[in-house]
Image: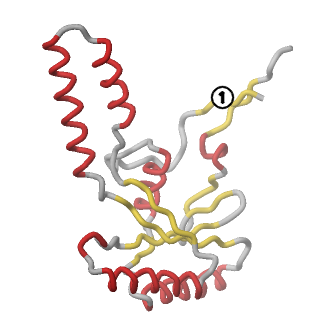
Amino acid sequence: MTMAKKKNSVQKLIGFDAFTKNGIKTDRFEFVIFHVEPVNISVLPPEVIEAKIHDLTLVLGVIPELEIMALDSCECFDDNKIFLQKRLREERSEAVRKLLEADLKFLDEIQLGMSTAREFLFIYRFHREKEEQIFTLINRVSKAISDHGFMAKRLSKSELKRMIALYFGSSVTGDEIPDTDIQEVEDIV
């Protein structure tokens, strides 16, 4: 049996249509995404942490459709560490073993230093609302977020592109991503 091959763009495969003035449009929704300034809870007293959790509960009570996303804003070294550990088990030369151990230690130190580098996002999905409804809802969501003590701002197009790159693991350096998908991906049908 032969398989037909069909070429699709990555954009089409993930359902991405376009950037809009409000956010991102997919084949089913339009998303408005707010970046939330993180709070270092490790230095806060328990009562302040409880108050923050209560504030988040209130925001979600006022806007139950609001979604929360947390993603790493830095590179993950797990694959590199696994590779180095495997090499370390197989390596016979003591000099090379010392270098591999030093590399592992270095990656651990970098990863520890970046462990608090997280991005927090509030996401609101629009289904088929009209433009004036979207504008009103964006203002309502933004007000609810700020009224409950969260510093958040809507992501610009370049910030959205950076967030997408982080999510899909294609850019951890914040490099600018082109607006169009120029490479095609083979999808076996």
Residue 163 percent coordinates (x, y) = 44, 56
User: Considering the image in quadrants, where does the N terminus appear?
Assistant: top right
Residue at image point 26% right, 11% down: 91
Q: Is residue 163 above or below residue 136?
A: above
Question: To which residue does mark 1 refer?
Answer: 186
Q: Is residue 96 above or below residue 15?
A: above
Residue 140 percent coordinates (x, y) = 55, 88
Residue at image point 46% right, 72% down: 34
Of 1 and 186, nearer the camera is 1
User: Considering the image in quadrants, where does the C terminus appear?
Assistant: top right
Residue 135 percent coordinates (x, y) = 58, 83
Of 146 and 59, nearer the camera is 59
Residue 35 percent coordinates (x, y) = 42, 70
| Mark 1 secondary-structure assignment | strand
- At label 1, the amino acid type is Glu
Residue 132 image-quadrant placement: bottom right
Residue at image point 41% right, 59% down: 158
Residue 55 appears left or right of 184 = left
Total marks drawn? Answer: 1
The outermost residue toward the bottom is 147
Q: How is the image coloured?
A: secondary structure
Q: Is residue 31 above or below residue 80?
A: below
Residue 7 appears left or right of 113 = right
Residue 169 appears left or right of 125 = left
Crowding near the residue tagged with mark 1, few <14, some 14–19, many ≥20 C-alpha atoms within 10 Å? few
Of 46 and 133, nearer the camera is 46
Q: Is residue 38 above or below residue 50?
A: above
Of 170 and 113, nearer the camera is 113
The outermost residue toward the top is 92
